[in-house]
């Protein structure tokens, strides 16, 4: 008979022996730990090694057990209990993930689950700082709105308020804010809040306009690091604790000095292309400050190296947002008051779609798109690679936007960029790659075909699409089929190399396939996305290994 009980424990699976009657209080703690993490299944009657030994007689009434758990958890956790008839009877307790707050046992214990270094799970206490982080990720707590009662308005720097007014003018912030007095401005942006006739600075107020010594005192987690590396040589390594507006200006000034421009000419087509899109950089840096978890220790890190620019900030993605759904998830933020202030000042995207601007800066020039794959539940990491612009693709996009009299949508840019990198892709492939619905992709493709910038190509039984040969260098369908086959061979060659040598680097791929570094980077990235390879580290000398 096929086994329906998992063989091993994981973050969402826990085994408990019930031979000597597992303590009820421990069951409640396990349920709470699941609810405060990702949810999961607790199996009573299974040993740690997966051996099925059966559930104790006292736990075999599944109706009583589910009610017992609900009555001993606060708020009550609605578990589903079922009896599984394996070699011996086993109780499966399915616990839903709590999305509306923190759960505790009736005795007041708050637990969570985590994986240990050896990959096995454990339940541990959830500490006060972790409670803030959890509520923040669920959007039930806005840490940035909290008043700091120990601070006074003297902890806010008048020079930073003047900087704020200057940025309001430079970035076309809300004009009405300029007409307000300093106190009215601080109240309007949530920098201070009044309670019992006294104005107290908020976390947002200290972050935007606080004196450095006050920020260190009241928000010690707010640290920023800026690094520039040439090979293994460190050119700049600065760490500072400054108000956000000051920090952003400082970082952008540094990067502008390093951000070279390239003049591109092709007949009458001429444009100046910076190595890194300024809009992409500004949105990426603002997002790092805007959405980081200020209740966690850590630092915002901006690193410029031979490969590109990395912008990393503590705190994972907000609940419901993943690397795959970045461009499709509804806009949401961790620090609502801080985000709203930065939007009104003019630094952050007013629609909440700053992520679109981050991708748009690369897509317009046919460059490799920004990479968030280095992110995890503790960190959001944005990598913007160095690469040359694609002149013909830039011309195609510029021409289409001029014809329409408006910018192309981010989804249309993503589809056209994929057809540039993977000509011959069909609607299903594009949909899966971009995590978009097939109906949306089909609409974008049909509009592009009608505009004459995309052509259909029959490849076997599948209808693929390519950028128009009249506007962009596009090979015949036979050539596309050959390249598709070559791409599969290239993937196989890379995987075989990694299996044989134990790992593979970008330079290995360049030498193995005789392709450019950008092509090697894109190929490795696709293999990571498909699960064929696993990145071991990041940076210029990143290594990849095969999935075990």
Image (spheres, rainbow, N blue to C red):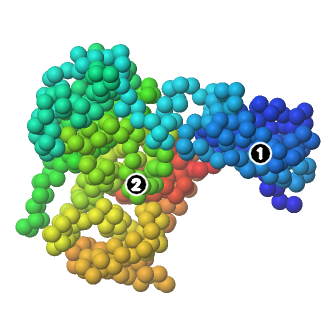
Q: Nearer the viewer, residue 422 or 299?
A: 299
Which residue: 60% across, 40% down?
Answer: 37
For residue 148, what is the image quadrant?
A: top left
Which residue: 29% across, 41% down?
Answer: 340
Side of 175 relative to 533 (left or right): left
> Can residue 29 be seen in this snapshot?
yes
Side of 312 relative to 395 (left or right): right
Mark 2 sits on what residue?
Answer: 330
Q: From mark 1 to mark 2, how far is it between C-alphas?
A: 35 Å
Where residue 5 appears, x then y in whole percent?
79, 51
Which residue: 20% across, 21% down?
Answer: 157
User: What kind of element bears circle 1?
Assistant: helix
Where residue 472 appears, x then y in whole percent?
24, 72
User: What kind of element bears circle 2?
Assistant: loop
> Can residue 30 be seen in this snapshot?
no
Query: Measured along the vertical axis of the image, is residue 453 above or below residue 43?
Result: below
Query: Measured along the vertical axis of the image, is residue 127 above or below residue 444?
Result: above
Which residue: 45% across, 68% down?
Answer: 437
Where residue 115 appears, x then y in whole percent?
63, 36
Which dot marks residue 66?
1
């Amino acid at each position: 008979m096929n086994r329906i009980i998992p063989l091993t424990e994981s973050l969402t699976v826990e085994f408990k022996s019930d031979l000597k009657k597992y303590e009820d209080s421990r069951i409640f703690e396990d349920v709470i730990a699941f609810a405060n993490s990702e949810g999961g299944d607790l199996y009573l009657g299974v040993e740690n090694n997966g051996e099925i030994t059966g559930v104790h007689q006292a736990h075999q009434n599944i109706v009583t057990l589910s009610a017992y758990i609900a009555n001993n958890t606060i708020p009550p956790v609605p578990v589903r209990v079922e009896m599984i008839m394996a070699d011996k009877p086993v109780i499966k307790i399915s616990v839903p993930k709590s999305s509306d707050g923190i759960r505790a046992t009736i005795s007041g214990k708050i637990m969570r689950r985590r994986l240990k270094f050896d990959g096995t799970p454990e339940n541990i206490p959830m500490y006060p700082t972790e409670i803030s982080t959890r509520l923040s990720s669920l959007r039930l707590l806005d840490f940035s709105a909290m008043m700091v009662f120990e601070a006074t308005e003297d902890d806010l720097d008048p020079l930073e308020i003047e900087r704020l007014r200057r940025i309001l003018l430079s970035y076309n912030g809300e004009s009405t804010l300029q007409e307000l007095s300093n106190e009215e401005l601080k109240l309007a942006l949530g920098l201070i809040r009044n309670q019992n006739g006294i104005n107290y600075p908020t976390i947002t107020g200290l972050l935007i306009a606080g004196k450095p010594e006050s920020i260190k005192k009241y928000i010690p987690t707010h640290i920023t690091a800026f690094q520039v590396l040439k090979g293994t040589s460190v050119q700049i390594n600065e760490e500072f604790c400054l108000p956000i507006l000051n920090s952003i200006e400082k970082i952008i000034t540094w990067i502008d000095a390093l951000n070279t421009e390239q003049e591109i000419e092709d007949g009458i087509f001429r444009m100046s292309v910076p190595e890194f899109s300024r809009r992409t950089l500004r949105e990426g840096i603002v997002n790092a400050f805007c959405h980081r978890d200020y209740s966690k220790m850590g630092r915002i890190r901006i690193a410029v190296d031979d490969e590109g620019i990395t912008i990393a900030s503590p705190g994972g993605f907000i609940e419901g947002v993943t690397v795959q759904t970045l461009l499709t998830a509804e806009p949401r933020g961790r620090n609502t008051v801080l985000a709203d202030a930065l939007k009104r000042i003019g630094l952050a995207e007013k629609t909440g779609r700053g992520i679109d601007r981050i991708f748009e800066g690369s897509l317009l020039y046919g460059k490799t798109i920004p990479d968030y794959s280095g992110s995890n539940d503790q960190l959001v990491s944005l990598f913007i690679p160095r690469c040359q612009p694609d002149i013909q693709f830039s011309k195609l996009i510029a021409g289409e936007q001029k014809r329409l009299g408006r910018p192309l949508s981010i989804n249309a840019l993503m589809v056209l960029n994929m057809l540039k990198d993977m000509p011959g892709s069909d609607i299903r492939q594009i949909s899966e790659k971009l995590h978009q619905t097939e109906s949306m992709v089909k609409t974008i493709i049909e509009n592009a075909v009608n505009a004459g910038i995309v052509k259909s190509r029959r490849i076997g039984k599948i209808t693929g699409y390519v950028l128009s040969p009249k506007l962009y260098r596009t090979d015949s369908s036979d050539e596309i089929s050959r390249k598709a086959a070559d791409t599969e061979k290239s993937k196989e060659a890379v995987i075989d190399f990694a299996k044989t040598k134990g790992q593979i680097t970008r330079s290995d791929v360049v030498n193995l396939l005789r392709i450019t570094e950008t092509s090697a980077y894109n190929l490795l990235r696709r293999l990571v996305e498909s699960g064929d390879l696993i990145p071991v580290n990041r940076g210029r000398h990143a290594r990849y290994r095969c999935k075990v």
